[in-house]
Image: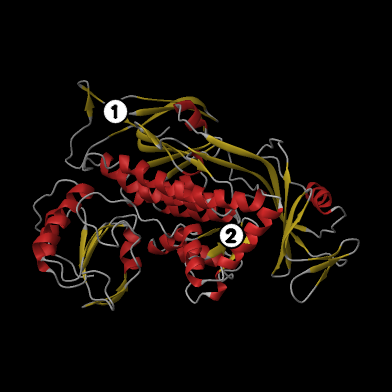
Amino acid sequence: MSVGVDYRDERGHDETFGGERQVVDTDVIIVGAGPTGLMLAAELRLAGVRALILERQPQPRDTPKASGIGGRILDLLRYRGILDRFEAASSDPNVAPRFPFGNVYLDLTQLADPPMRALPLAQREIERLLDERAGELGADIRRGREVVGVRQDDATVTADVRGPDGSYRVTARYLVGCDGGRSRVRDMAGFAFPGTTYPEVNRLGQVTVPDSVTVLDNGDIDVPGLGRIRSGFTRTDRGVFAFAIISGVLSLQTTEDESTEYDDDEPLTLTELADSARRVLGADLPLGEPIRLSRYTFKDRQAEQYRDGRILLAGDAAHLFPATGTALNVGMLDTVNLAWKLAADIQGWAPIGLLDTYHDERHFAGARARLQTRAQVALRRSHDPAADALREVFQELLVDESALRRMGALVGHADIRYPMPGSNHHALTGAFAPDLTLHTDQGTTTVAELMHTARPILLDLADRPELREIARDWLHRIDIRTAKTDDRPADALLIRPDAHIAWAASIDEPADTAALALREALSSWFGAPLEATAPITPA
Protein backbone atom coordinates (compact mmCIF):
# COMPACT_ATOMS: atom_id res chain seq x y z
CA MET A 1 0.00 0.00 0.00
CA SER A 2 1.29 3.46 -0.83
CA VAL A 3 2.48 5.70 1.95
CA GLY A 4 -0.31 7.89 3.26
CA VAL A 5 0.04 11.59 2.42
CA ASP A 6 -2.00 14.56 3.51
CA TYR A 7 -4.54 15.80 1.00
CA ARG A 8 -4.40 19.53 0.45
CA ASP A 9 -6.81 21.51 -1.70
CA GLU A 10 -5.69 24.29 -4.06
CA ARG A 11 -5.67 26.72 -1.12
CA GLY A 12 -3.17 24.57 0.79
CA HIS A 13 -5.50 23.46 3.60
CA ASP A 14 -5.48 20.03 5.21
CA GLU A 15 -8.71 18.10 4.66
CA THR A 16 -10.44 17.71 8.03
CA PHE A 17 -13.56 15.79 8.93
CA GLY A 18 -15.21 15.72 12.34
CA GLY A 19 -12.29 17.61 13.85
CA GLU A 20 -9.70 14.96 12.89
CA ARG A 21 -7.22 15.24 10.05
CA GLN A 22 -7.80 12.48 7.49
CA VAL A 23 -4.90 10.72 5.78
CA VAL A 24 -5.77 9.59 2.27
CA ASP A 25 -3.66 7.04 0.40
CA THR A 26 -4.46 8.45 -3.03
CA ASP A 27 -6.89 10.73 -4.79
CA VAL A 28 -8.67 8.18 -7.00
CA ILE A 29 -8.70 4.39 -6.85
CA ILE A 30 -9.33 2.83 -10.25
CA VAL A 31 -10.42 -0.80 -10.18
CA GLY A 32 -9.41 -2.53 -13.41
CA ALA A 33 -6.43 -2.10 -15.76
CA GLY A 34 -8.22 -2.54 -19.06
CA PRO A 35 -8.33 0.24 -21.66
CA THR A 36 -10.92 2.20 -19.65
CA GLY A 37 -8.98 2.13 -16.39
CA LEU A 38 -5.64 2.90 -18.02
CA MET A 39 -7.08 5.79 -20.03
CA LEU A 40 -8.70 7.21 -16.91
CA ALA A 41 -5.42 7.03 -15.01
CA ALA A 42 -3.59 8.92 -17.76
CA GLU A 43 -6.27 11.62 -17.93
CA LEU A 44 -6.24 12.05 -14.16
CA ARG A 45 -2.48 12.46 -14.15
CA LEU A 46 -2.73 15.12 -16.87
CA ALA A 47 -5.06 16.97 -14.52
CA GLY A 48 -2.62 16.67 -11.61
CA VAL A 49 -4.52 14.01 -9.68
CA ARG A 50 -2.96 10.95 -8.04
CA ALA A 51 -4.33 7.73 -9.51
CA LEU A 52 -3.91 4.18 -8.20
CA ILE A 53 -5.00 1.26 -10.40
CA LEU A 54 -5.80 -2.03 -8.69
CA GLU A 55 -6.00 -4.95 -11.13
CA ARG A 56 -7.03 -8.47 -10.16
CA GLN A 57 -4.96 -10.23 -12.83
CA PRO A 58 -1.24 -10.54 -12.02
CA GLN A 59 -0.24 -9.98 -15.65
CA PRO A 60 -1.87 -8.36 -18.70
CA ARG A 61 -4.18 -10.90 -20.33
CA ASP A 62 -3.47 -12.36 -23.75
CA THR A 63 -7.05 -13.56 -24.27
CA PRO A 64 -8.15 -11.94 -27.57
CA LYS A 65 -10.91 -9.41 -27.11
CA ALA A 66 -11.35 -6.18 -29.07
CA SER A 67 -9.51 -6.00 -32.39
CA GLY A 68 -9.33 -2.24 -32.86
CA ILE A 69 -10.49 1.24 -31.96
CA GLY A 70 -12.41 3.71 -34.06
CA GLY A 71 -14.54 6.78 -34.37
CA ARG A 72 -14.29 9.74 -32.00
CA ILE A 73 -11.72 8.15 -29.69
CA LEU A 74 -9.15 8.37 -32.51
CA ASP A 75 -9.74 12.14 -32.66
CA LEU A 76 -9.31 12.36 -28.91
CA LEU A 77 -6.04 10.42 -28.98
CA ARG A 78 -4.81 12.83 -31.64
CA TYR A 79 -5.87 15.76 -29.45
CA ARG A 80 -3.70 14.27 -26.70
CA GLY A 81 -0.74 13.88 -29.07
CA ILE A 82 -0.50 10.09 -28.85
CA LEU A 83 -2.41 8.78 -31.87
CA ASP A 84 0.84 8.23 -33.75
CA ARG A 85 1.82 5.57 -31.18
CA PHE A 86 -1.31 3.60 -31.93
CA GLU A 87 -0.96 4.00 -35.68
CA ALA A 88 2.64 2.78 -35.53
CA ALA A 89 1.50 -0.38 -33.72
CA SER A 90 -1.39 -1.10 -36.13
CA SER A 91 -1.12 -3.65 -38.90
CA ASP A 92 -3.05 -1.36 -41.25
CA PRO A 93 -3.43 2.26 -40.09
CA ASN A 94 -5.11 3.17 -43.38
CA VAL A 95 -7.70 0.39 -43.49
CA ALA A 96 -10.71 1.18 -45.69
CA PRO A 97 -13.66 2.59 -43.69
CA ARG A 98 -16.15 -0.20 -44.32
CA PHE A 99 -17.98 -1.49 -41.26
CA PRO A 100 -20.58 -4.18 -40.51
CA PHE A 101 -23.88 -2.92 -39.15
CA GLY A 102 -26.11 -5.81 -38.16
CA ASN A 103 -26.08 -7.95 -41.28
CA VAL A 104 -25.47 -5.07 -43.70
CA TYR A 105 -22.52 -2.75 -44.27
CA LEU A 106 -21.70 0.92 -43.88
CA ASP A 107 -19.41 1.52 -46.82
CA LEU A 108 -17.82 4.89 -46.11
CA THR A 109 -15.18 4.45 -48.80
CA GLN A 110 -17.37 6.40 -51.22
CA LEU A 111 -17.04 9.54 -49.07
CA ALA A 112 -14.06 11.84 -49.54
CA ASP A 113 -14.05 12.68 -45.81
CA PRO A 114 -15.73 9.79 -43.95
CA PRO A 115 -17.20 10.68 -40.52
CA MET A 116 -15.40 7.77 -38.88
CA ARG A 117 -12.48 5.48 -39.41
CA ALA A 118 -11.03 2.52 -37.57
CA LEU A 119 -7.58 1.42 -36.51
CA PRO A 120 -7.00 -2.35 -36.42
CA LEU A 121 -5.14 -3.13 -33.21
CA ALA A 122 -5.37 -6.05 -30.81
CA GLN A 123 -6.62 -5.14 -27.36
CA ARG A 124 -3.42 -6.36 -25.74
CA GLU A 125 -1.56 -3.76 -27.83
CA ILE A 126 -4.06 -1.06 -26.92
CA GLU A 127 -3.56 -1.89 -23.26
CA ARG A 128 0.24 -1.95 -23.63
CA LEU A 129 0.27 1.53 -25.15
CA LEU A 130 -2.14 2.93 -22.57
CA ASP A 131 -0.13 1.28 -19.77
CA GLU A 132 3.00 3.00 -21.07
CA ARG A 133 1.20 6.32 -21.28
CA ALA A 134 -0.22 6.10 -17.76
CA GLY A 135 3.17 5.05 -16.40
CA GLU A 136 4.95 7.93 -18.12
CA LEU A 137 2.54 10.35 -16.47
CA GLY A 138 3.11 8.83 -13.03
CA ALA A 139 0.09 6.60 -12.44
CA ASP A 140 0.55 3.83 -9.86
CA ILE A 141 -0.47 0.51 -11.48
CA ARG A 142 -0.61 -2.53 -9.17
CA ARG A 143 -1.46 -5.94 -10.57
CA GLY A 144 -2.46 -9.05 -8.66
CA ARG A 145 -4.60 -6.92 -6.33
CA GLU A 146 -8.26 -7.92 -5.98
CA VAL A 147 -10.76 -5.50 -4.50
CA VAL A 148 -13.06 -7.56 -2.29
CA GLY A 149 -15.00 -4.78 -0.57
CA VAL A 150 -15.85 -1.11 -0.94
CA ARG A 151 -17.51 1.36 1.39
CA GLN A 152 -17.80 5.10 1.57
CA ASP A 153 -18.69 7.97 3.85
CA ASP A 154 -19.07 11.69 3.28
CA ALA A 155 -15.30 12.21 3.02
CA THR A 156 -13.62 9.14 1.59
CA VAL A 157 -14.08 5.74 -0.01
CA THR A 158 -12.25 2.65 1.23
CA ALA A 159 -11.31 -0.44 -0.75
CA ASP A 160 -10.53 -3.76 0.91
CA VAL A 161 -7.74 -5.31 -1.12
CA ARG A 162 -6.35 -8.84 -1.28
CA GLY A 163 -2.86 -9.04 -2.77
CA PRO A 164 0.29 -11.17 -2.84
CA ASP A 165 1.39 -9.76 0.53
CA GLY A 166 -1.94 -10.25 2.25
CA SER A 167 -5.01 -8.10 2.84
CA TYR A 168 -5.05 -4.38 3.44
CA ARG A 169 -7.14 -1.25 2.91
CA VAL A 170 -6.71 1.74 0.65
CA THR A 171 -8.58 5.01 1.08
CA ALA A 172 -9.17 7.70 -1.52
CA ARG A 173 -11.39 10.63 -2.32
CA TYR A 174 -13.11 8.65 -5.08
CA LEU A 175 -13.21 5.13 -6.51
CA VAL A 176 -14.08 4.32 -10.13
CA GLY A 177 -15.13 0.83 -11.20
CA CYS A 178 -13.53 0.09 -14.58
CA ASP A 179 -13.66 -3.65 -14.00
CA GLY A 180 -15.74 -4.82 -16.95
CA GLY A 181 -19.16 -6.21 -17.69
CA ARG A 182 -19.13 -8.46 -14.61
CA SER A 183 -18.03 -5.58 -12.39
CA ARG A 184 -17.50 -6.48 -8.76
CA VAL A 185 -17.50 -2.80 -7.85
CA ARG A 186 -20.92 -2.33 -9.44
CA ASP A 187 -22.32 -5.30 -7.54
CA MET A 188 -20.72 -4.44 -4.19
CA ALA A 189 -21.86 -0.82 -4.39
CA GLY A 190 -25.40 -1.83 -5.38
CA PHE A 191 -25.74 -0.10 -8.76
CA ALA A 192 -28.81 -1.26 -10.71
CA PHE A 193 -27.81 -2.69 -14.11
CA PRO A 194 -31.02 -3.50 -16.00
CA GLY A 195 -31.18 -4.80 -19.54
CA THR A 196 -31.16 -7.90 -21.73
CA THR A 197 -28.78 -10.75 -22.46
CA TYR A 198 -29.34 -12.19 -25.93
CA PRO A 199 -29.32 -16.00 -26.24
CA GLU A 200 -26.60 -16.15 -28.88
CA VAL A 201 -22.90 -16.86 -29.05
CA ASN A 202 -20.55 -15.27 -31.56
CA ARG A 203 -17.25 -16.89 -32.48
CA LEU A 204 -14.66 -14.84 -34.32
CA GLY A 205 -11.51 -16.08 -36.01
CA GLN A 206 -8.67 -14.85 -38.17
CA VAL A 207 -6.87 -17.73 -39.88
CA THR A 208 -4.60 -18.30 -42.83
CA VAL A 209 -6.35 -19.42 -46.03
CA PRO A 210 -5.82 -23.17 -46.51
CA ASP A 211 -4.71 -24.48 -49.91
CA SER A 212 -8.05 -26.26 -50.45
CA VAL A 213 -9.96 -22.95 -50.37
CA THR A 214 -9.93 -20.86 -53.56
CA VAL A 215 -10.18 -17.09 -53.21
CA LEU A 216 -12.02 -15.62 -56.21
CA ASP A 217 -11.30 -12.24 -57.79
CA ASN A 218 -14.31 -10.57 -56.18
CA GLY A 219 -13.41 -11.76 -52.66
CA ASP A 220 -15.78 -14.76 -52.58
CA ILE A 221 -14.38 -18.19 -51.78
CA ASP A 222 -14.89 -21.62 -53.33
CA VAL A 223 -14.87 -24.47 -50.79
CA PRO A 224 -14.88 -28.21 -51.59
CA GLY A 225 -18.20 -29.69 -50.50
CA LEU A 226 -19.78 -26.28 -50.03
CA GLY A 227 -19.22 -24.55 -53.35
CA ARG A 228 -19.09 -20.78 -53.67
CA ILE A 229 -19.68 -18.65 -50.56
CA ARG A 230 -20.21 -14.93 -50.98
CA SER A 231 -18.14 -12.56 -48.89
CA GLY A 232 -20.22 -10.82 -46.24
CA PHE A 233 -23.12 -12.45 -44.43
CA THR A 234 -24.68 -15.86 -45.16
CA ARG A 235 -27.80 -16.72 -43.17
CA THR A 236 -29.01 -20.29 -42.73
CA ASP A 237 -31.67 -21.90 -40.57
CA ARG A 238 -28.93 -22.67 -38.06
CA GLY A 239 -27.29 -19.25 -37.71
CA VAL A 240 -25.18 -16.66 -39.51
CA PHE A 241 -21.78 -17.09 -41.12
CA ALA A 242 -19.77 -14.06 -42.21
CA PHE A 243 -16.31 -13.71 -43.69
CA ALA A 244 -13.94 -11.40 -45.55
CA ILE A 245 -10.46 -11.78 -46.96
CA ILE A 246 -8.30 -8.98 -45.55
CA SER A 247 -4.60 -8.77 -46.47
CA GLY A 248 -4.57 -12.46 -47.34
CA VAL A 249 -6.17 -13.47 -44.02
CA LEU A 250 -9.54 -15.19 -43.71
CA SER A 251 -11.58 -13.32 -41.09
CA LEU A 252 -14.75 -15.21 -40.20
CA GLN A 253 -17.53 -15.12 -37.66
CA THR A 254 -20.34 -17.44 -36.71
CA THR A 255 -23.48 -16.53 -34.77
CA GLU A 256 -25.66 -19.23 -33.20
CA ASP A 257 -28.58 -19.09 -30.81
CA GLU A 258 -27.20 -20.58 -27.62
CA SER A 259 -27.69 -19.83 -23.94
CA THR A 260 -24.36 -21.20 -22.68
CA GLU A 261 -22.50 -18.92 -20.26
CA TYR A 262 -18.80 -19.04 -21.10
CA ASP A 263 -16.00 -17.93 -18.81
CA ASP A 264 -14.33 -14.86 -20.31
CA ASP A 265 -10.93 -16.41 -19.54
CA GLU A 266 -11.74 -19.68 -21.38
CA PRO A 267 -10.14 -19.27 -24.83
CA LEU A 268 -11.85 -20.23 -28.06
CA THR A 269 -10.15 -23.11 -29.86
CA LEU A 270 -9.84 -23.68 -33.60
CA THR A 271 -11.82 -26.90 -33.19
CA GLU A 272 -14.71 -25.06 -31.50
CA LEU A 273 -14.76 -22.47 -34.29
CA ALA A 274 -14.69 -25.17 -37.00
CA ASP A 275 -17.51 -27.09 -35.29
CA SER A 276 -19.61 -23.90 -35.16
CA ALA A 277 -18.99 -23.19 -38.86
CA ARG A 278 -20.02 -26.77 -39.69
CA ARG A 279 -23.28 -26.41 -37.76
CA VAL A 280 -24.16 -23.12 -39.47
CA LEU A 281 -23.10 -24.04 -43.02
CA GLY A 282 -24.00 -27.75 -42.92
CA ALA A 283 -20.55 -28.90 -44.10
CA ASP A 284 -16.91 -28.67 -43.12
CA LEU A 285 -15.07 -25.40 -43.75
CA PRO A 286 -11.28 -25.93 -43.94
CA LEU A 287 -9.40 -23.51 -41.70
CA GLY A 288 -5.70 -22.64 -41.78
CA GLU A 289 -3.43 -21.64 -38.93
CA PRO A 290 -5.13 -19.49 -36.27
CA ILE A 291 -4.00 -15.88 -35.90
CA ARG A 292 -6.72 -14.66 -33.55
CA LEU A 293 -9.64 -16.48 -31.93
CA SER A 294 -12.30 -15.03 -29.63
CA ARG A 295 -15.81 -15.68 -28.39
CA TYR A 296 -18.39 -13.28 -27.06
CA THR A 297 -22.04 -12.92 -26.21
CA PHE A 298 -24.19 -9.82 -26.61
CA LYS A 299 -25.73 -7.93 -23.69
CA ASP A 300 -27.76 -4.74 -23.76
CA ARG A 301 -27.44 -3.18 -20.30
CA GLN A 302 -26.85 0.25 -18.79
CA ALA A 303 -26.42 1.27 -15.17
CA GLU A 304 -29.27 3.46 -14.00
CA GLN A 305 -26.72 5.80 -12.41
CA TYR A 306 -23.01 6.18 -13.15
CA ARG A 307 -22.37 7.77 -9.76
CA ASP A 308 -23.31 6.94 -6.19
CA GLY A 309 -21.56 9.38 -3.89
CA ARG A 310 -17.84 8.73 -4.12
CA ILE A 311 -18.13 5.59 -6.23
CA LEU A 312 -18.46 5.87 -10.00
CA LEU A 313 -18.61 3.51 -12.98
CA ALA A 314 -17.05 3.75 -16.43
CA GLY A 315 -16.71 1.52 -19.47
CA ASP A 316 -18.27 -1.95 -19.50
CA ALA A 317 -19.03 -1.65 -15.80
CA ALA A 318 -21.50 1.12 -16.75
CA HIS A 319 -22.82 -0.18 -20.07
CA LEU A 320 -22.84 -3.20 -22.38
CA PHE A 321 -23.86 -3.00 -26.03
CA PRO A 322 -25.28 -5.74 -28.27
CA ALA A 323 -22.84 -5.20 -31.17
CA THR A 324 -19.10 -5.16 -31.74
CA GLY A 325 -16.93 -2.12 -32.30
CA THR A 326 -18.62 0.05 -29.68
CA ALA A 327 -17.88 -0.79 -26.05
CA LEU A 328 -14.16 -0.07 -25.87
CA ASN A 329 -14.47 3.25 -27.70
CA VAL A 330 -17.37 4.48 -25.56
CA GLY A 331 -15.60 3.39 -22.37
CA MET A 332 -12.45 5.33 -23.17
CA LEU A 333 -14.54 8.40 -23.98
CA ASP A 334 -16.26 8.04 -20.59
CA THR A 335 -12.93 8.57 -18.87
CA VAL A 336 -12.03 11.73 -20.76
CA ASN A 337 -15.31 13.27 -19.63
CA LEU A 338 -14.86 12.10 -16.05
CA ALA A 339 -11.21 12.81 -15.27
CA TRP A 340 -11.18 16.60 -15.34
CA LYS A 341 -14.39 16.78 -13.32
CA LEU A 342 -12.93 14.53 -10.62
CA ALA A 343 -9.82 16.70 -10.63
CA ALA A 344 -11.88 19.85 -10.19
CA ASP A 345 -13.62 18.37 -7.15
CA ILE A 346 -10.45 17.01 -5.59
CA GLN A 347 -8.57 20.28 -6.14
CA GLY A 348 -11.38 22.23 -4.53
CA TRP A 349 -12.66 24.42 -7.33
CA ALA A 350 -15.53 22.43 -8.87
CA PRO A 351 -18.79 24.36 -9.28
CA ILE A 352 -21.82 22.83 -7.58
CA GLY A 353 -23.09 19.86 -9.57
CA LEU A 354 -20.07 19.57 -11.91
CA LEU A 355 -19.37 15.93 -11.07
CA ASP A 356 -23.03 15.03 -11.58
CA THR A 357 -22.72 16.13 -15.20
CA TYR A 358 -20.56 13.03 -15.77
CA HIS A 359 -23.63 10.86 -15.37
CA ASP A 360 -25.86 13.25 -17.29
CA GLU A 361 -23.57 13.50 -20.31
CA ARG A 362 -22.15 10.00 -20.52
CA HIS A 363 -25.45 8.26 -19.76
CA PHE A 364 -26.84 10.26 -22.68
CA ALA A 365 -23.91 9.14 -24.86
CA GLY A 366 -24.40 5.54 -23.74
CA ALA A 367 -28.06 5.72 -24.69
CA ARG A 368 -27.05 6.87 -28.19
CA ALA A 369 -24.70 3.90 -28.45
CA ARG A 370 -27.48 1.57 -27.29
CA LEU A 371 -29.76 3.05 -29.94
CA GLN A 372 -27.55 2.11 -32.86
CA THR A 373 -26.49 -1.25 -31.43
CA ARG A 374 -30.11 -2.20 -30.73
CA ALA A 375 -30.89 -1.34 -34.35
CA GLN A 376 -28.15 -3.77 -35.31
CA VAL A 377 -29.88 -6.44 -33.23
CA ALA A 378 -33.08 -5.95 -35.26
CA LEU A 379 -31.16 -6.27 -38.51
CA ARG A 380 -29.12 -9.21 -37.27
CA ARG A 381 -31.56 -11.44 -35.41
CA SER A 382 -34.73 -11.29 -37.49
CA HIS A 383 -35.23 -14.34 -39.73
CA ASP A 384 -38.36 -13.86 -41.85
CA PRO A 385 -39.03 -12.30 -45.30
CA ALA A 386 -40.05 -9.03 -43.66
CA ALA A 387 -36.66 -8.82 -41.99
CA ASP A 388 -34.95 -9.55 -45.31
CA ALA A 389 -36.92 -6.67 -46.81
CA LEU A 390 -35.87 -4.39 -43.95
CA ARG A 391 -32.21 -5.19 -44.53
CA GLU A 392 -32.56 -4.58 -48.26
CA VAL A 393 -34.29 -1.22 -47.80
CA PHE A 394 -31.79 -0.17 -45.15
CA GLN A 395 -28.89 -0.98 -47.46
CA GLU A 396 -30.52 1.02 -50.26
CA LEU A 397 -30.83 4.05 -47.98
CA LEU A 398 -27.11 3.92 -47.33
CA VAL A 399 -26.43 4.72 -50.96
CA ASP A 400 -27.49 8.32 -50.20
CA GLU A 401 -24.57 10.42 -48.93
CA SER A 402 -26.52 12.26 -46.24
CA ALA A 403 -27.88 9.03 -44.74
CA LEU A 404 -24.45 7.38 -44.90
CA ARG A 405 -22.81 10.34 -43.17
CA ARG A 406 -25.43 10.37 -40.45
CA MET A 407 -25.05 6.66 -39.76
CA GLY A 408 -21.26 6.87 -39.82
CA ALA A 409 -21.32 9.66 -37.26
CA LEU A 410 -23.78 7.72 -35.07
CA VAL A 411 -21.69 4.54 -35.12
CA GLY A 412 -18.47 6.48 -34.59
CA HIS A 413 -19.92 8.44 -31.60
CA ALA A 414 -19.17 11.65 -33.53
CA ASP A 415 -22.76 12.90 -33.36
CA ILE A 416 -22.68 13.55 -29.60
CA ARG A 417 -23.67 17.08 -28.66
CA TYR A 418 -24.10 17.36 -24.91
CA PRO A 419 -27.05 19.43 -23.69
CA MET A 420 -25.49 22.53 -22.13
CA PRO A 421 -26.92 24.74 -19.37
CA GLY A 422 -27.21 28.48 -19.69
CA SER A 423 -28.32 30.96 -22.30
CA ASN A 424 -25.76 30.20 -25.01
CA HIS A 425 -27.43 28.30 -27.85
CA HIS A 426 -24.79 28.41 -30.57
CA ALA A 427 -24.91 25.39 -32.89
CA LEU A 428 -21.43 24.31 -31.71
CA THR A 429 -22.21 24.39 -27.99
CA GLY A 430 -21.89 20.88 -26.57
CA ALA A 431 -20.22 19.50 -29.70
CA PHE A 432 -16.66 18.23 -30.13
CA ALA A 433 -14.30 21.06 -31.05
CA PRO A 434 -13.29 20.96 -34.72
CA ASP A 435 -9.57 20.68 -35.40
CA LEU A 436 -9.09 24.13 -36.89
CA THR A 437 -5.82 25.26 -38.42
CA LEU A 438 -4.77 28.34 -36.43
CA HIS A 439 -2.56 31.18 -37.62
CA THR A 440 -0.75 33.08 -34.88
CA ASP A 441 2.16 35.50 -34.52
CA GLN A 442 4.30 32.52 -33.54
CA GLY A 443 3.31 30.41 -36.56
CA THR A 444 0.69 27.84 -37.44
CA THR A 445 -0.81 25.37 -34.99
CA THR A 446 -4.07 23.44 -34.58
CA VAL A 447 -6.77 22.94 -31.99
CA ALA A 448 -5.50 19.36 -31.56
CA GLU A 449 -2.04 20.61 -30.62
CA LEU A 450 -3.46 23.05 -28.10
CA MET A 451 -5.34 20.19 -26.39
CA HIS A 452 -2.27 18.02 -25.72
CA THR A 453 -2.13 19.18 -22.10
CA ALA A 454 -5.88 18.73 -21.52
CA ARG A 455 -6.22 22.32 -20.33
CA PRO A 456 -9.46 24.21 -21.03
CA ILE A 457 -9.03 26.97 -23.59
CA LEU A 458 -10.71 30.22 -24.53
CA LEU A 459 -9.88 30.47 -28.22
CA ASP A 460 -10.42 34.00 -29.59
CA LEU A 461 -10.72 33.81 -33.37
CA ALA A 462 -11.94 37.36 -34.05
CA ASP A 463 -9.79 39.58 -31.83
CA ARG A 464 -12.46 40.19 -29.18
CA PRO A 465 -10.47 41.85 -26.33
CA GLU A 466 -13.58 42.28 -24.19
CA LEU A 467 -14.02 38.49 -24.12
CA ARG A 468 -10.38 37.90 -23.27
CA GLU A 469 -10.66 40.43 -20.46
CA ILE A 470 -13.57 38.52 -18.91
CA ALA A 471 -11.66 35.24 -19.14
CA ARG A 472 -8.64 36.75 -17.33
CA ASP A 473 -10.50 36.16 -14.05
CA TRP A 474 -10.20 32.40 -14.74
CA LEU A 475 -6.64 32.47 -16.05
CA HIS A 476 -5.49 30.22 -13.20
CA ARG A 477 -7.68 27.45 -14.64
CA ILE A 478 -7.91 28.08 -18.39
CA ASP A 479 -5.58 29.09 -21.20
CA ILE A 480 -6.43 32.10 -23.35
CA ARG A 481 -5.32 31.90 -26.98
CA THR A 482 -5.72 34.29 -29.88
CA ALA A 483 -5.53 33.16 -33.49
CA LYS A 484 -7.06 33.46 -36.92
CA THR A 485 -8.52 30.66 -38.97
CA ASP A 486 -9.99 30.25 -42.43
CA ASP A 487 -13.80 30.06 -42.45
CA ARG A 488 -14.04 30.57 -38.71
CA PRO A 489 -17.09 28.80 -37.21
CA ALA A 490 -17.48 31.33 -34.38
CA ASP A 491 -15.86 34.47 -33.00
CA ALA A 492 -14.62 32.57 -29.95
CA LEU A 493 -14.80 29.09 -28.42
CA LEU A 494 -14.56 27.96 -24.81
CA ILE A 495 -13.25 24.39 -25.03
CA ARG A 496 -13.37 22.02 -22.05
CA PRO A 497 -10.53 19.55 -21.30
CA ASP A 498 -12.54 16.77 -22.98
CA ALA A 499 -12.54 18.88 -26.19
CA HIS A 500 -16.26 19.62 -26.05
CA ILE A 501 -17.35 23.23 -26.52
CA ALA A 502 -18.87 24.84 -23.42
CA TRP A 503 -19.66 28.18 -25.10
CA ALA A 504 -19.32 29.81 -28.50
CA ALA A 505 -19.70 33.42 -29.62
CA SER A 506 -21.68 33.89 -32.79
CA ILE A 507 -20.02 35.94 -35.51
CA ASP A 508 -20.92 39.61 -34.95
CA GLU A 509 -22.80 38.75 -31.74
CA PRO A 510 -23.38 41.89 -29.62
CA ALA A 511 -20.60 42.36 -27.10
CA ASP A 512 -22.86 42.53 -24.02
CA THR A 513 -24.75 39.34 -24.96
CA ALA A 514 -21.57 37.39 -25.62
CA ALA A 515 -19.93 38.69 -22.45
CA LEU A 516 -22.85 37.68 -20.25
CA ALA A 517 -23.00 34.16 -21.74
CA LEU A 518 -19.23 33.71 -21.48
CA ARG A 519 -19.13 34.67 -17.82
CA GLU A 520 -22.04 32.32 -17.17
CA ALA A 521 -20.25 29.43 -18.93
CA LEU A 522 -16.95 30.07 -17.14
CA SER A 523 -18.68 30.03 -13.76
CA SER A 524 -20.75 26.95 -14.62
CA TRP A 525 -17.75 24.85 -15.69
CA PHE A 526 -14.68 26.32 -13.99
CA GLY A 527 -15.90 27.70 -10.70
CA ALA A 528 -15.49 31.04 -9.01
CA PRO A 529 -13.21 33.63 -10.64
CA LEU A 530 -10.00 34.94 -9.13
CA GLU A 531 -8.19 38.16 -9.95
CA ALA A 532 -5.90 37.43 -12.90
CA THR A 533 -2.53 39.14 -13.24
CA ALA A 534 -0.64 36.95 -15.69
CA PRO A 535 -0.34 38.08 -19.31
CA ILE A 536 -2.47 36.56 -22.05
CA THR A 537 -0.43 34.15 -24.18
CA PRO A 538 -0.94 33.92 -27.95
CA ALA A 539 -1.44 30.43 -29.36
Could you give the CA–CA distance between mark 1 and mark 2, rounded to whole angstroms? 41 Å
Give the residue displayed 21% in from the left and 71% down from the top.
Answer: 461
Indicate the secondary structure of the residue bearing disc 2: loop
* Percent x, y of residue 149: 47, 25
Give the residue displayed 38% in from the left and 63% down from the top.
Answer: 79
Colouring used for the render: secondary structure
Quadrant location of the N terminus?
A: top left
Residue at the far front in the pictured view: 386
- Residue that mark 1 sits on: 155
Q: Quadrant of residue 513?
A: bottom left
Label for residue 471?
Answer: none
Name the kind of residue labelled 2 in the image: Leu
Crowd around label 2: few <14 · some 14–19 · many ≥20 (10 Å): some
Q: Is residue 3 visible?
A: no
Name the kind of residue labelled 1 in the image: Ala
Against 440, is 41 above or below? above
* Percent x, y of residue 469: 10, 62
Give the residue displayed 65% in from the left and 57% down from the top.
Answer: 103
Q: Nearer the viewer, residue 419 or 176?
A: 419
Count of marks, rendered view: 2
* Percent x, y of residue 465: 11, 68
* Percent x, y of residue 178: 48, 40
- Residue that mark 2 sits on: 121
Q: Nearer the viewer, residue 343 or 304?
A: 304
Q: Is residue 330 left or right of residue 47?
A: right
Quadrant location of the C terminus?
A: bottom left
Q: Nearer the viewer, residue 536 or 310?
A: 310
Q: CB atoms at circles 1 and 2 under 8 Å apart?
A: no
Q: Is residue 497 visible?
A: yes
Q: Quadrant of residue 484?
A: bottom left
Indicate the secondary structure of the residue bearing disc 1: loop
The earlier-in-sequence mark between 1 and 2 is 2
